[in-house]
Image (spheres, helix red, strand yellow):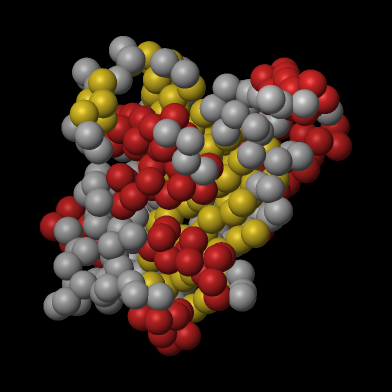
């Protein structure tokens, strides 16, 4: 028979968990920019599916790190997004990808830049965090580490290049080359579990026509990705060369903490200031420490979605806030009516 003292302690611990728990949430974005009307539905389907897949990880007692990775993996295989398959092309017509992930419990991070012919860069970012002994890897050392950890590169090379990306590069070359962002497409995810643990992750192919070796904000912790259980978590998208100048992800969360302002209000304000001061467009999604979703962008569009409980919300324009019916899950597939 259990001792009464241990029964009391167990009951107390259960009470603490129930009293201080939050409702889990997974929120994702599919990139900030200007999207043609014919591609908006595909992006909305993609982000809504990604949010649901990530949420199912939490519902199955998975970690927030696993939740953001699975959400991003959905978008890395979707040609509607600028990440993995569907990444935009550099000036030479090749795909070079960046990614990062951060654990809000201890600020552990994993980041990479310039990886080629790897379908899921976000998984490699997680491996860097867990197994490399470092935060950020690039170049030949990055590829050697990936091989060491059992990652498989696509053969022959170039299989991540899509026809849409080729046409976008040709259009950019034929223009005055002043358009840096286009429709965007960088993908990101932020998750919070029932205990308030937060993770954030971001994955991208960069910008059309970029120089070989260019690094944007996505792999830079504090610019494109940031998570801390005491501050919140954000994944950023947009004009990376400008976002890096203002360390947007950390600046939003730290400013909100110091001023006592809501993260949503702070994000709106700092994005507006970035646009005014530097001419940059961008957006972000995330959660605050109470698990409230944050969606902000100064671009024309940013596809986003989240699932919290049975609620699945999504949008693309600033005024958008749409609700999907509760999803039905069959095996690994999540289905929702659009």
**Where's the C terminus, which quadrant?**
top left
Q: Where is residue 126? Give x, y as percent.
A: 49, 61
> What residue is rendered at 40% in x and 81% in y?
148
Confirm whether residue 256 shows in the render. Answer: yes
User: Within the image, what quadrant is residue 213 found in?
Assistant: bottom left
Q: Where is residue 240? Give x, y as percent.
A: 52, 56
> What residue is rendered at 21% in x and 64% in y?
160
As rendered, which of 312 and 175 lies closer to the eye? 312
Vertical order, 146 against 247 (above or below): below
* Residue 203 horizontal side relative to residue 227, left or right: left
As rendered, which of 221 and 73 lies closer to the eye? 73
* Residue 103 horizontal side relative to residue 319, left or right: right
Q: Where is residue 326? Give x, y as percent.
A: 33, 15
User: Within the image, what quadrant is residue 276 found in?
Assistant: top right
> What residue is rendered at 47% in x and 41% in y?
62
Vertical order, 41 against 183 (above or below): above
* Residue 117 horizontal side relative to residue 52, left or right: left
As rendered, which of 12 and 270 lies closer to the eye? 12
**Where's the N terminus, which quadrant?**
top right
| Count of picture labels | 0
């Amino acid at each position: 028979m259990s001792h009464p003292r241990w029964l009391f302690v167990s009951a107390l611990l259960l009470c603490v968990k129930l009293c201080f728990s939050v409702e889990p949430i997974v929120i994702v974005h599919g990139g900030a920019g200007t999207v043609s009307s014919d591609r908006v539905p595909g992006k909305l389907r993609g982000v809504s599916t990604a949010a649901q897949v990530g949420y199912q990880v939490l519902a199955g007692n998975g970690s927030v790190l696993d939740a953001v990775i699975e959400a991003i993996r959905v978008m890395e295989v979707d040609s509607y997004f600028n990440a993995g398959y569907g990444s935009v092309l550099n000036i030479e017509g090749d795909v070079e990808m960046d990614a990062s992930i951060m654990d809000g419990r201890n600020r552990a991070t994993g980041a990479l830049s310039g990886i080629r012919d790897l379908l899921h860069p976000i998984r490699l970012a997680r491996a860097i965090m867990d197994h490399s002994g470092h935060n950020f890897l690039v170049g030949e050392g990055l590829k050697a580490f990936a091989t060491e950890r059992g990652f498989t590169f696509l053969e022959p090379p170039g299989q991540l290049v899509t026809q849409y990306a080729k046409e976008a590069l040709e259009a950019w070359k034929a223009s005055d080359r002043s358009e840096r962002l286009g429709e965007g497409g960088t993908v990101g995810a932020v998750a919070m579990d029932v205990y308030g643990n937060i993770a954030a992750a971001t994955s991208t192919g960069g910008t059309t026509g970029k120089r070989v070796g260019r690094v944007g904000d996505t792999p830079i912790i504090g610019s494109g990705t940031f998570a801390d259980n005491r501050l919140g978590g954000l994944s950023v998208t947009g004009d990376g060369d400008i976002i890096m100048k203002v360390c947007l992800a950390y600046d939003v969360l730290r400013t909100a903490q110091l001023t006592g302002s809501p993260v949503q209000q702070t994000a709106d304000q700092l994005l507006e200031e970035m646009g005014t001061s530097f001419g940059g467009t961008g957006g972000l999604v995330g959660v605050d420490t109470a698990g409230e979703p944050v969606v902000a962008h100064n671009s024309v569009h940013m596809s986003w979605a989240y699932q919290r409980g049975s609620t699945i919300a999504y949008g693309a324009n600033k005024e958008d806030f749409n609700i999907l019916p509760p999803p039905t899950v069959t095996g690994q597939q999540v289905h929702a009516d659009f």
